[in-house]
Image (spheres, rainbow, N blue to C red):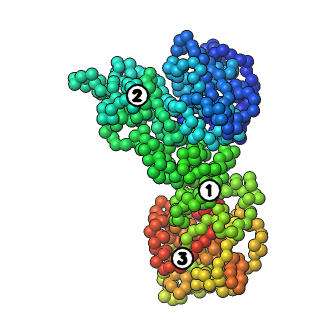
Amino acid sequence: MSHPDITTPNQSRPRAHPAPSAGGPTTLAGATQPKIDNTAAYQGCGLDEDNIRLLEISPAASDTSPLVCTLREATFRSRPEFDALSYRWGPDDPAEKETITLNGYPFEVRRNLRDALRFLRRRTPPRQAFWIDAVCINQGDIAEKTRQLRIMDQIYFRASMVVVWLGAGKYAELQREMAGGGPGEKPEDEKPQDEEPEGMKPKDDTSKHSLSRQQELARYLRTDPYWGRLWILQEIGSARKLEVCYGEQAMPWAAFIHFLTMHNSDGKDGPLRLNTLLREEKYHGSHTLKRLLEEHRDAQCFNPRDKVYGLVGLAIDAADFPMDYAKSPYEVWKDTMEFMNRRNLFVDESQILPTGALVKSLLMASHGDPLSQVIKEHSMNPTDSTQLITDPQSHHSFRLKAIALGCVLHIGPSASEMVSSPKKVSAWRGAIQRVFAAPELGFARQEHDALLDALLRSDESEVERMCFNRPSTVIWRENTKSSLSNYDCNSRSPPPEPIQQAPDRLAPVQPRLYLVRRTPDRTAQKMGVASSLVQSLDLVCGVRSSRRALLVRVVEVGTWNTSVRVFGTALATEDLCGGAGGCDFEERWMSLGKGGNSLDVHVDAGTIFMILE
């Protein structure tokens, strides 16, 4: 289901404990109903990961009688018998809010849950225990909620039955119109697999109206918004036994899927697709964390963190994944990438950036400037953000395949100066003539004009967002005779920089123009814009699946080894001109690779984040 009240984990609800009540509110028309404090119903300490609360629904004389429920704690060690409810929480609309009594206190739920509780009260014996997340977890206790959500898969697996509740409303109305044409309740192990469930087929060959109603019901069931929710993936995928309930009907999962298959002409979607991915293919590769993120990227949830957290319990390779709702979306992204790196869940380096881009889109689809995320992370945890990593095998270090565009031989004016000062443009043209030989000057002038045109058409802040002053926290060593020696970048000592020095990761950007040359080949991409941290002798290196290049710098030269570090990002002219929408990453990578000059670079998660679109 869509778990309630998770969006603002650092905010606590007021604790004005109201007096116990035996039923729902009875306010007069137009009167203001007092705000209900749901935390009043919980007593004692919060739950740990070995305990759960179970709900019991008191019997009632009629269906409209107030709902009265009680909670009791149970340990997993006691092997409690209970059913777990899987449902859709519903919109945050005052008209959708209902009040029940829980442990003697008024307790607010949404209408869909109220309908589910009434349904369960009608059809289950007294003392039947249920686990329902919105009630059995104290939603006002963030620590308890985090602990309980870590074991959601275990809760649904241990349930005797997972009850899928699709709602009342339209289903009850349609069932009344069908006059008995709804699904039967024959046990699934007694039902022939090639026969439509009893009560699903028309009473005779002339009952076309009944058949039409059944097809309409199947369409409602197949397209119910419940199937688009993210948390139901874990609930359905973890369940040992499933029952689907709607209106006044209840039927086993297998019979439900059979009914939809018989009346579905639109291919596999909704529950049919989920049945294949979550149950039929559960142990055949579809439940890796990476595959789950890809397959269910469109699943909906209230809290963006749940785009990851809601799939962890279902994944076969995500044990001990760190879950903490107090973390920012960027921190959850970083946890995901470093977890996958530590567990070798990237088959090869080519998957790192596409996976990072996917997880970023899931967690931060509504965020604009990615730099703001890192600034927030930096201010929250400055110690971690400046800690240098010297072990390339650390899970904090990501290895990317790069191709050198060339070595920086000249640093020009800032992008804003190129727009505002013709004199700076003239000086820049003079530098181009000095760096490149006559056979390349025509191509260089053509690229210069394209670069200037792009700068004139671009907003200054837009250009700044494309380049980042962010030194990577990873430093690695290269053999002095490695591919770096193909360039003049380490032919003389670079400006001294103590390795222990903490980088200024929040320095103003002010991108600068640069010229690069690649020897002995003709330089295909001669210029562009880069972070203001760019220095002469830096290597500009393109990486797969990103139009942003990396500034790679030799920071220390030794007899046998050189120390190397990434100091920011850069864009070549064609990448600045093309824009995110017009950039074919794979075609660009193939073009860069024609001249060879590949090397491995090592970066931290924050640098990965910076070069993603």
Q: Where's the N terminus, which quadrant?
A: top right
Pointers 1 and 3 in contact (C-beta within 8 Å): no
Where 573 sits versus 59, above or below? Answer: below
As shown in the figure, which amino acid type bears the numbered disc 2? Pro
Query: Which residue is pictured at 61% across the width and 77% down the height?
Result: 539
* Picture disc at residue 187: 2
Residue projecting furthest to the front: 78
Q: Is residue 568 left or right of residue 224?
A: right
Mark 3 crowd level (few <14, some 14–19, many ≥20, 10 Å Cα):
some
Q: Quick check: can you spot residue 310?
A: yes
Pointers 2 and 1 in contact (C-beta within 8 Å): no
Q: Quick check: can you spot residue 610?
A: no
Nearest to the observer: residue 286 or residue 480 = 286
* Picture disc at residue 339: 1
Q: Is residue 288 left or right of residue 414?
A: left
Pointers 3 and 2 in contact (C-beta within 8 Å): no
**Element class at badge 1:** helix
As shown in the figure, which amino acid type bears the numbered disc 3? Ser
Query: Which residue is pictured at 55% across the width and 23% down the height?
Result: 117
Where 329 sits versus 191, above or below? Answer: below
Real-space Cα separation, disc 1 to disc 3, in angstroms: 27 Å
